[in-house]
Structure formats: C-alpha cells, structure tokens
Image (spheres, rainbow, N blue to C red):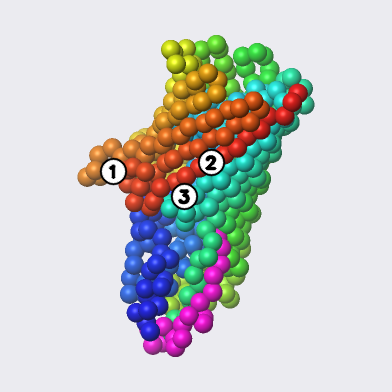
Amino acid sequence: MQSAVHRAVKRRRAPKPAAPCGIPQAVWTPNRKDFVTRSVRFFLMMLVTLAGTDDALGQRVAKYGADFLAGGVGARALGMGGAFISVADDVYAGFWNPAGLPEVDAREVSYMHAERFSGIVSFDYTGFAVPFSDRSVLGVSLIRSGVNDIKNTLDAWDAERDQPIPDPESAITTFSAADYALLVAYGKRVTQAFSFGVTSKIIRRNIGAFATAWGYSMDIGVRYRTPSWHLGATVQDVTTMLQSWSVDTDRLAAIQDVFGDDLPEGGTELVLPVLRLGASRLMDVRPGLLRLAMDMDLSFDGATSYTLSLGSMAMHPRLGAELVVADRVAFRAGFNRIQFVDGEGIDLTPSVGTGFRWGRAALDYGFGDFAGLVSDLGYSHRISAQYRFAD
C-alpha cells in the first residue's frame, strides 16, 4: 500500500530544480518522508517562512516576497525577454512602467494567460486603460498566479509508526496556493518627451486554509522619448511593501509530528524597493521597424546568488528585440535571465514570440523557459489578446 501511494504522489510532484523561483533547495530535496514533502511543507516554507529573511530595523526582509509578479505580463513583453521598462506604451504599462500610459490615446483592454513549468503554475492577467485627456491615463490590472490541486497528505501519515496510515488515500485532500494583485496606475505626460506615473498595489496571498497575507505598496516611474530612443526608469515598491501573514497553527500541528519542524509563524515582512532601468532604440530596417531594448534591475534585498552583484546590490540584466513588418506582424526574441552559475559559467534563459495585429485587435504569443537551467522545470507558454476601442 505504501509503495502505491508513493507512486501516486510522485506523479503529481513538481520537478526538483526550483532556484529560478527563489525556492530554497532544501525544501525540494526528497527525504525519507517524501510521502508528505510534496504538499504543505513546500508551500509554507516557500511563502510563509520564505527560507531566507534578514532582520532590518526589527523587521524581516523577504527576499522573494512578491516573486509571483517578477515574471511580468503580456506575451509581447515576455517574448522580448521582459526588457520593457522603456518600451511600455499600451495598457500593459500599468504593470511595467506607469509613465508609459500617456501613450494610450483610446480605451484599451487586454487579457493574458500563461502556463509555467509545464502547466504547474497558472497565471492570469486582465487590464484596461482609460484616457482622461490627451495627457493623462488611468490603468487597472488584476493578476492571479496559482498552483491548484496540491496534495495535502499530513493527515495520511502516522508519525508514531513513521509510515502512512491504513487506507491513506481517504485522508488525502487537495488545496490551492494562489497570489492575487490589484494594480491601479496613473500616468501623465508633462511634455511631448517626458512623462511620469504612479501605481498603487494591493496583493493577497493564500496557501489553502493554512496561511494568508495582505500586502500594500506603490511604484513610481518616468519615461523620456526621442524619435529614436526611449528611456525609462521605475522604482518598484518605492514605499517598501509590507506583507502581513496570518498562520492557522491548529491546521498545521501535524508538521511538528511528521517533520519535527517548528511551526511557521505569522508576522510582517518587508519587500525592499527595486530600481529598474531601461533603454530602447528604434531603427528603420528593410523589412520594417526594429526595436532593441535592454533593462537592468538593481535590487538590495541580499539575494545575490547567481547574479552580478556589488555588495548587497544584485544586478539583473534583460535583453530584447522586436521586428514589426508592415505594422501587422511582429517577431520577438530576448533573454529574461542572465546569471552566473558555479561550475557552469553563464546561464541564459531565452524567450521568443510573435504577434499579429488586425485593425484594433492584437494577438500575441510567447514561448520561454526552454533553455538554461530553468528548462528543467518545463516550458512556459504565454498568450495575450488586446483590443483598442474607437476614440
């Protein structure tokens, strides 16, 4: 019976590598109680204790506190490797850089669905932008990222006998771990070349009925453009995001019996600001219009593994390109992760994509995580649709 249950749980287990998501390797490493490791322990250790927090001014600093937002939105942007801080000029600017919203001159709506790591993580985004005038635009975005049908096997393990209970399948339940975000953004054009914007964020995180959290923060952004060059900068979580966790310790009592671990505790965590810089250049080429873009994220949370770093500051570069032919068909490519791995050298995570525009409608597709170390987790597919209403 025990071997049959082990096989059933193993079929549902996520791939072992997890560093790209900021998940501690110890959480993924199987041990003799592999029967339950696939369930609650992974998500609680990843999202509640965060396995790597430092004390700052008496608060815990979360190195991966809002990591579900780090992947970005929009198949166009992600096909370009996420190098979009200076490029953002449509409804997606409410996420990337609110200073790009003034480029929206009519109401726009958009939707994106992504499947990451061979469908393990489901990601959905919807947004709309409404111009108030020819200089100011409001944008609203809703995001959900989650893993569904997670096996909760805590009640199926007999800690005293160190083996599953009789008929363990009857004690196995499922739950979801999901993150939600509401972004309200405002952008204003100051001159023909310069604009600024601000985004307010509210996030809600839950791990089944075991733990929940609320978070609040703001981003600010600026954008400067010339006929050939676009420059952009944002400070993500400029106010420092506060995340307040609440943990139901009664539901998690079995963790101490099964693993011998201390129960996770609730509390407040800080997500420190990230400075994001971007530059892009437009060039007329024979097939159409070519755009080259580069972003650089500067973070100060101490998560410097596998990155270019200077002290506690980590640098995360991204590169992207887009070729638009006849203002209708687009081809895109980029690198959304460039990191340095001991014994492996430079590790690159490329992405590619394409897009089609017909009148006021656009459809974009992006494909990523197909190379580099992250490819061990499985491919990622992103598809997004966008519609621009008449003026």
Q: Position of residue 205 (x, y in %)?
A: 60, 56
Crowd around label 3: few <14 · some 14–19 · many ≥20 (10 Å): many
The residue carrying mark 3 is 116
* Residue drawn at the location 34% of the way across and 63% of the way down: 29
Picture quarter containing residue 372? top left
The dot on residue 383 is 2
Q: Is residue 197 visible?
A: no
Image coordinates of residue 343 in percent, x first then y, are: 22, 45
> Hey, what amino acid is under mark 1?
Val
Q: CA distance from mark 1 to mark 2?
A: 30 Å
Residue 327 vertical placement versus 147 (above, below): above
Q: CA distance from mark 3 to mark 2?
A: 12 Å
Label whose residue precedes the other's in the sequence (1 or 2): 1
Give the residue at x 53% y 41%: 383
User: What amino acid is found at the position of numbered circle 2 in the picture?
Assistant: Ile
**Looking at the picture, how far across and down is residue 25, in whole percent?**
36, 57
- Looking at the rendering, which quadrant does residue 157 occupy? bottom left
Q: Kindly identify the amino acid type of the residue bearing the numbered disc 3.
A: Arg
Mark 3 vs 1, N-terminal side: 3
Q: Circle 1 sits in a helix, a strand or a loop, which is it?
A: strand
Nearer the viewer's eye, disc 3 or disc 2?
2
Numbered mark located on residue 132 in the image: none
Q: Name the quadrant containing residue 362.
A: top right
Q: Tell me which segment is drawn in magenta.
A: 159-177
Q: Which mark is residue 341?
A: 1
